[in-house]
Amino acid sequence: MEKKRVLYISQEISPFLPQSDIAAAARKLPQGIQEGGKEIRAFMPRYGCINERRHQLHEVIRLSGMNLIINDVDHPLIIKVASVPQAKIQVYFIDNEDFFTRKATVSDDEGEYFEDNDERAMFFVRGVLETVKKLGWKPDIIHCHGWMTALTPLYIKKLYQNDPHFADAKVVYSVYDNGFNKNWDSNFHEKLKFDGFDEADIDDLKDVDFVTLTKKAIQVSDGVIQGSETIDADVTKAIEASTTPFLEYYSEESCVKPINEFYDQIFEEIAV
């Protein structure tokens, strides 16, 4: 029987960034799921604050070289890779001079969220999907961690739905207590239209804050997981009102088995 394949797309992964709910889960799960018999790939942004020398990042020339157009501007896509030796996993990094060289993650030293986080998120998600295609690797489950990945379900279900690499993939979105307090660019809706989305698919994304973005991810995902012990109250209400299959919070130490079973449950329900 062919191994199921799980693609992890994460805003953060330990040890490349400081420990957080997202970084810990996105480090623990790929290892545990791989040890349980599934095949995995893991991706995150190559933020400028990541120490490339310490973590031995290097560019993957055969995967780099594509250009992605975001809001009518060409942005070169650079792919790097590093290993987590104790976990026996590789992590691929999405890099770009315009979006990911600043010495920070999603906000500056004063805690101000970057004005272009919407375009950074678009570039990151599309960069992962185009790189997976270039790898020739077809995921069965795509598990997204953190709001930087929240557009993934929308792209998979609306723009990549007929792509043979993703047509059968099921998307799981983990919700965490990390949000952002600055609405995305008021032109974000138009940027999505430029990418090829139909108006009907993005009509609710004309004024995007953290809750609006998260609700959209919940709406178009095949499964939702509570990644932090406590999450935003409005997000909780959206989950309760949704028919999307839901898995409650499990700690980092105990999350691998129930999440692995959740993946299989989603496949069984879809198959029926």
Image (spheres, helix red, strand yellow):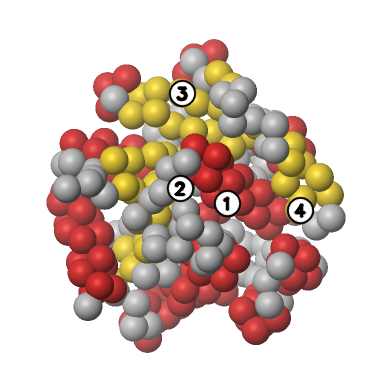
Residue at (52% x, 67% y) in the render: 161
Badge number at residue 70: 4
Task: Looking at the picture, tell me which residue is in the foreground, 109 or 125.
Answer: 125
Task: Looking at the picture, tell me which residue is in the foreground, 223 or 234.
Answer: 223
Task: Looking at the picture, tell me which residue is in the foreground, 111 or 210.
Answer: 210
* Amino acid beneath label 4: Ile
Q: Residues within 10 Å of mark 3 (few under 14, many from 20)?
A: some
Contact (CB < 8 A) between labels 2 and 1?
yes
Q: Position of residue 258 (x, y in %)?
A: 17, 57
Q: Residues within 10 Å of mark 1 (few under 14, many from 20)?
A: many
**In the displayed structure image, the side of residue 33 where residue 73 appears, left or right:** right
Residue at (45% x, 63% y) in the render: 167
Q: Residues within 10 Å of mark 2 (few under 14, many from 20)?
A: many
Instruction: Residue under label 2, please give it.
Output: 9
Instruction: Residue under label 3, please give it.
Output: 82
Quadrant where the C terminus is found in the figure: bottom left
Q: Earlier in the sequence, mark 4 or mark 2?
A: 2
Instruction: Residue under label 1, please give it.
Output: 125
